[in-house]
Image (cartoon, grey):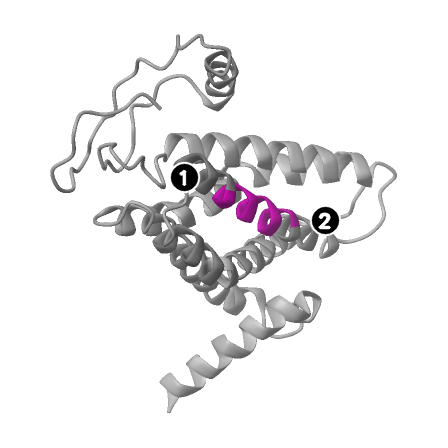
Amino acid sequence: MTRARSSFDLLALTGLVLREPKRVLEHAAPERLLPSLLTLVIAGAGLFGLVVGSYRGGLQHLWAAIKLPMVLLLPLLVALPACVALYRVAGVAVRHGQVVLAAVLGTARASLLLAAMTPALWLAYSIALPYHDAVLLMCGALVVAGGIGLSTTASLLPGGGHLRTAAHLGSLAIAAVVLAQGGWLLRPFLVRPRGEITFVRAPEADVFSSVAASYRSAKGDYRGWDAEPVPLWRGGDAPQQEAP
């Protein structure tokens, strides 16, 4: 009976997070909400990662399903203290616990939206979508869901503060940098069709130098793409690694 009630509560919470996130704060005490919200983050982002990993298949299903929740949860661990400081400097009367709950709720909503996109994503990947198009499709889904999650977080914070907008923009910049660099460190997610399946690649450079290298490669200059992956686990027999 307790297990059935817990499942019902989690389903009810899922509906509230998607339809009326502000009402979630009235649903239960924060210490009871956080475990359930984290469960939604892991389940939603994990399902999205599972479908992303299906582009290559095999062990990549598991690796991507593990890493996508980690990418979304990393800003909660790294960026929140700086965001709290920004809001307090901006004159917003906010407690650390309020920011944590709002951020987790926004992340849960983003994760559930990603899960809702998985049927369309799986269908697109099943028709042999070109690699770069597959990457753009994944990034587009992350941008849409992430934008809604960030706006949800901002709407749940207390009002007031003469520099509230500046605090929003500063927090957005911090979260974006952490999210981008975290995703870069945990790559690959799709894996090229003839690439080697690894849990992570070598931690060379950073996401910003990679963008610069991508810009140079578009002009025919392939310097900066000579790093080899670090296979923490190999899945299947794969040919030699391609240049990204």
Residue at the extreme front of the image, as rendered:
127
Q: Is residue 233 above or below residue 38?
A: above
Which contiguous range is marked in magenta?
137-147
Residue 81 % position (x, y): 58, 38
Q: Circle 2 sits in a helix, a strand or a loop, which is it?
A: loop
Tell me the kind of residue under disc 1: Pro
Q: How many marks?
A: 2
Which residue was labeled with disc 2? 94
Residue ranking furthest to the right: 162
At mark 1, the secondary structure is loop
Residue at coordinates 28% horizontally, 51% vertically from top-left? 61
Q: Quadrant of residue 201?
A: top left
Q: Amino acid at mark 2?
A: Val
Residue displayed at 34% across by 52% down: 65
Q: Quadrant of the C terminus?
A: top left
Residue toward you, 31 or 151? 151
Residue at the far left: name it. Answer: 237
From the viewer's side, name the closer residue of 196 and 111.
196
Looking at marks 1 and 2 on the same chain, the residue that comes earlier in the sequence is marked by 2
Rendered residue at 49%/16% (across/down): 218
Q: Would you call the spot at circle 1 few (<14 residues within 10 Å), some (14-19), or many (20 or more)?
A: few
- Magenta stretch, main secondary structure, is helix
In the picture, the disc for residue 130 is 1
Question: In terms of image quadrants, where is residue 86?
Answer: top right
Q: Quadrant of residue 164?
A: top right
From this view, report whether residue 61 is shown above or below residue 231. below
Give how far across and how far down residue 17 sits, in percent.
60, 67
- Residue drawn at (28%, 37%) of the image: 193
Whether 19 is drawn above or below 60: the answer is below
Tell which of 27 and 50 is nearer to you. 50
